Structures are given as structure tokens and as C-alpha cells.
Image (spheres, rainbow, N blue to C red):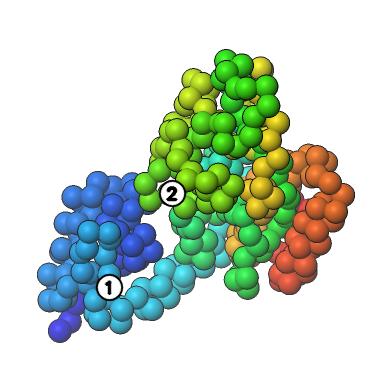
Amino acid sequence: MNVDLQWDDLRIFLAVCDAGSLSGAARRLKVSQPTLSRRIAEMEYGLGEPLFVRKNQGISLTKTATRLLPAAQGMAQWATEASRSLDAKTSPVSGRVRITAAPAFAFDVLAPLAETLKRKHSQITLEVLASTELLNLSRGEADLALRKHPSDDPDLITVDQVIVPIGAYVSRDYAKSLPAKYDFRDVDWIAWAGQHEMVSPNPQLAGRIPDFRPAFTSDDYSVQVAACRAGVGAMVLLKTSHRVKRPGELVELKLELPAALRPSLTIICHKRMADLPKVRTVVELLRKEFADLRKSQPAEERQTATSTAKRAREAAPKRSQREVQTG
């Protein structure tokens, strides 16, 4: 059988494999699910064999898909490398830079950063991909990533790392409704819902509160913040949140949160992206932001985070390492 598979077909195939569901792949590719399903059906018709087994909780790969996957991944990486090689030589300090981050980091770190970028480098556009899914930097699904942990992928550089201070926040009216002496069990908690129910802080709160049942849940971070502002209950927020909220809108509760909740935030960059002027510009702003956050850390944590980032940078190729460090 002679099948002419186009790169666009393989890109869709890879998105479904990575997302584990048609709906997740459709969101990632920014197409409707019926359109994506039709494209997959056309591929399967051309191959004469199914690629996926549809299930209630997603998809699984058939033997045909399993055989096709390594070749498709290789093509994706080669295509990305070719594009980056050309961009590194011709790219001006302008264009779009895509950053993937968990919703909390996108909301509290990247949204304010966009204002600084617009003011200082208006020719660069920031595209923030807020998701709990890990996008593939090697295949060009994003240019940079903010993640909780450094990467052990030799093609990815850990540029910098910081431990972000957090707190439990409520509206002023809600704070007044609490008893004079309160603990975790006295508070109505806002948390993640649905497929995100194991995302922090849910497990940590469940470990602290017997029979933990949130007062409000949502699979959307901004909806959770809106509920917190409305006085529904408490939400664990980064202490950077004050920059994007009206002064005095939320107040911090006097609760000692579990140490496991304090997120370590890491800038991850593919080594080939480090050569692009537009990416270096954004990395420089991020590192300045990290330096400001680091000032609020205890000395021991600051030293640990700095050492981790330094070791990762030293393991990177010399040229990329130097250019990322100098911005």
C-alpha cells in the first residue's frame, strides 16, 4: 500500500497522541473537534487501518499508530530544527514568542510581564499557552516554558529557578465571617474540578483536612479567582497576585500552608531557541522577574534554587548557555 501522508496529517496525528484524546488535541490545535475527527477519519481511510481506539476516557493507539509514531516524532523534530536554524540567522528582535505555563503562573507572572514587554519591546508579541498539560518544546509547540521542575532532557536548558511565595487569600467580607481563631477546617476552599482534581492544591489540602470537600471547584483558574473575589471562600495564590488585583481586594489568611505547596518555578528553553533575539529578550525579562521574586526568599531556599539553575546551565551547550545568561 502506497500512502502519501502529508506533514499536516502527521501533525494532527501527533497532537492526538500527545493529548490522549480528540478533544484535547482539538484544543491544542485550535480547531473544532468535528474537524479534527474528520481529518483523522480521512487518514485512517487512506491507510486502510484504524489509528486509534476511541474510549470514554480518551483514546489508545492501535498497532498501526504505534508503528507510525516514532517516524512522525522524528519528522516533527526535524521540521522544527530546520525552521529554528533559519530563524536563528535571520530573526530580528520582533515577532511572536509563545510561552507555556500552568494557569497560576500564566495569570500571576506572565500576564503582568506582557505589560512590561509591550512597553519596552512593542515589536514582540507574547502568546501565553495556559495549560496543565506539558507541551513539547522539542517539536516547537512552545518557545519557552515555565514549569515546576527542571528538565532532564539534554536538549532543554534550565535557564533560572525560583521558589515562589504563596498564601491563602479571601475577600475582606469573607475574612470578617471567620471566627477569631480559625484553622484549615473552618475555611471554605476553592479548588480544581474534574480532570484537574489532582492538581495542586487539592492533594495537599486533602492531606491537611479530614474528608476534604471544596466549597467551590472549577477547571478554569480565572473562574476560581473570580469566585475568591466574590467571597465564596479561600484560594491558594502566588504572592505576586497583588500586581493584577485592585489594592485591598483580597486579604491573606494567617495559615501556615504545607511546604509541598510552595512551587518552584523554572524557566525552560530549547537550546536552539536560545539563539533567537526575540526569545533572548523575553528570557531577560523573565530572569529579572525571577531576581525580584528571589529577594523575598529565605537565604537557604535562594541558595538551593540558584545552585540548581547553575548546574543545569553548565550542562547546556556553551554558546546557548552564554547567550541565555546574558539575554
Mark linked to residue 61: 1
Q: Residue furthest toward the bottom?
A: 1
Which one is nearer the viewer's eye here, 173 or 2? Answer: 173
The residue indicated by pointer 2 is 197
Identify the residue at image location x=38%, y=78%: 70
Q: Confirm whether residue 143 shows in the render.
A: yes
- SS category of the residue bearing label 1: strand
Discs 1/2, front: 2
Tell me: residue 51, above or below residue 118. below
Q: Quadrant of residue 269?
A: bottom right
Q: Quadrant of residue 42?
A: bottom left
Asked whether the beta carbons under mark 1 and mark 2 sit within 8 Å of each other, the answer is no
Q: Quick check: 204 left or right of 72? A: right
Tell me: residue 143, above or below residue 281. below
Identify the residue at image location x=83%, y=41%: 295
Residue 108 in picture, x, y percent from top left: 60, 36
Q: Earlier in the sequence, mark 1 or mark 2?
A: 1
Q: Quick check: 188 left or right of 299? A: left
Q: CA distance from mark 1 to mark 2?
A: 26 Å
Q: Quick check: 258 left or right of 309? A: left
- SS category of the residue bearing label 2: loop
The type of residue carrying mark 2 is Glu
Residue 249 in picture, x, y percent from top left: 61, 18
Identify the residue at image location x=73%, y=55%: 160
